[in-house]
Image (cartoon, helix red, strand yellow):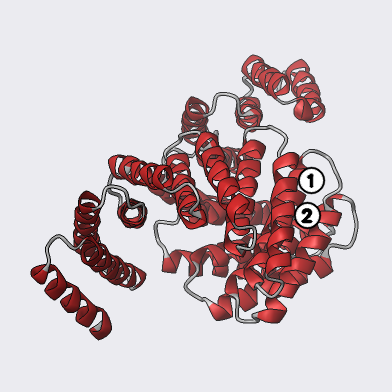
Amino acid sequence: MPALAEALGDFDQAIALDPLNGFAWEHRGDVRLNWGNARQARGLDPGDLYRLAADDFLRAAGLDPGWFGSRSSLGLVLSNWCAWREEHGEDTEEMERDALAAFAQAVELNPASAQTWELRGIAFMNRANRGRHRGVDPLPGYREAVGSFDRALALNAKSPTTWLYRAWMHAQCGTWESERGEDPEPSYGRADADYAEAAKVNPGLAEIALRRGSLRLNWGVHASNVGRDPEPHYVLAVGHLDRALAAHPALAEGWRLRGGVYVNWAGVKAAQQEDAEPCFREAIASYGKSLELNPANAQAWVQRGMTRMNWALARQGRGEDPETTYGEAAADFANALERNPQLADGWRWLGGLRINWADWRASQGGDGRELIAQAIEALGKALEADPSSAATWSIRGAARLKLVEAEQKAGGDGAAADAAAREDFAQALARNPRDADTYVRRGQAHHAMARWAEALADWERAAAIDPASVAAVAKLREEAERKRGEGK
């Protein structure tokens, strides 16, 4: 960084000549901040430069207590430093508070600075996202961020980035509300309106279309989950993403999101007994484009693997041979895990794939026990990477249940696999005691071992938790009562 080093030397000389020159202290801090940002972008530790920059901004603030700029710059360098520290597993809470305090001082000194309000909003946004990963409710932070962006837009409505940030916050509020079972539609609507305003200010900015496509994808998934028609959202999502990709065909994230739209759309069509093949093909092709552009993206490999697994299940449901598609899905998961061996989702989906593949083999008169054993192994690796996942414990219990059934079919009693399955279900329910799927699965495990009362009790719990499971539970209960009556 020759230019930055030269600028730093100039400000060093200026401070040596006049140590009371607040301008020189502040601008030396700016140089160090920019240099630290450049190091961070290359994956290098910016801590020393950020620390020196923060010291310079504090000196500048002490020399000119009425100037807001040094406080705003102090908040910015601390915010950037927090991002680095959080990425490397270091504590950020005290530094986050210091950054927000600096921005509070800056806007108090100059409430007419749109840029400072925007930076304050970004700091609240990032703090809320970090808290969310630690299990802290992010909504208060998101709302503080929205309030700051409101102030920035009141001062400068021509800033597309501020519209984008506020839209992103509304979208994040909607996603969080959806995860908690609340209605995200008002938040999603506000996000879409803000993206539209950003597009008016800068119609050629591809990021607007990209984010708007992502929003419509999430909106469509929510609509599908609550029994509404998601297709209008998916149509709009594809339109937005295609506009972004027309402007920037090498946008790997745009192709990845486009794949996500089409795989969800395929699921809707398959559930409605409509032809899902074109959607599956579009999804696979879009993920393929994304991976050509960014083969290091482990998550994109997982998502293409998931798409192929769902395509295999759809083919299986139509009586077609899914072997080739299962094999391609397994290869995608292997590619993901080669790039990130600690990716819990990759191991979990690989385990789920092998369970489904074993079911297919068994339905064709084959022995699926080897695939089931491989599924249990993969799910074990997922739990090593993330032992907190109730879903993974439950899925591994389901895999062990398959092993019980296969061993019984081969003339064994399945007792050891049954004991292991029940332990997995217990672990799952300890983490999520209101998971109806786990109660259904544990009930099936009891049923397989002729523990009729325990099976019925678990299925009753499932029906009480999730009314959508009532019909399935009724069929299971009927079969259990019949077998108990026959003395089996």
Badge 1 marks a residue whose secondary structure is helix
Mark 1 neighbour class, 10 Å CA radius: few under 14, some 14 to 19, many 20 or more: some
The quadrant in which residue 131 appears is top left
On screen, residue 436 above or below 70: above
Q: Residues within 10 Å of mark 2 (few under 14, many from 20)?
A: many
Q: Tell me the kind of residue under disc 1.
A: Ser
400 versus 244 height, above or below: above
User: Is the residue 100 above or below the residue 260 in the image?
Assistant: above
- The quarter of the picture where residue 9 lies is bottom left
Residue nearer the viewer, 346 or 47: 47
Is residue 382 at least partly visible in the picture?
yes
Locate residue 179 relative to residue 296 in the image: left or right.
right
Tell which of 36 and 285 is nearer to you.
Answer: 36
Q: Which residue is mark 1?
A: 224
Looking at marks 2 and 1 on the same chain, the residue that comes earlier in the sequence is marked by 1
Q: Are marks 2 and 1 in contact (CB under 8 Å)?
A: yes
Image location (x, y in percent) of residue 337: 45, 64
Q: Can the viewer see residue 365?
A: no
Q: Vertical placement of 10 versus 135: above or below?
A: below
Q: Residue at x 46, y 44 (%)?
A: 124
Q: Which residue is mark 2?
A: 267
Looking at the rendered structure, the kind of residue marked 2 is: Gly
| Quadrant location of the N terminus in the rendered image | bottom left
Residue shown at 56%/80% (left/top)? Answer: 293
Count of picture labels: 2
Quadrant assignment for the C terminus: top right
Q: Nearer the viewer, residue 132 or 407?
A: 132
Q: Which residue is rendered at x = 46% and y = 34% of the image?
A: 136
Q: Where is residue 355 shown, x and y percent of the image?
A: 61, 51
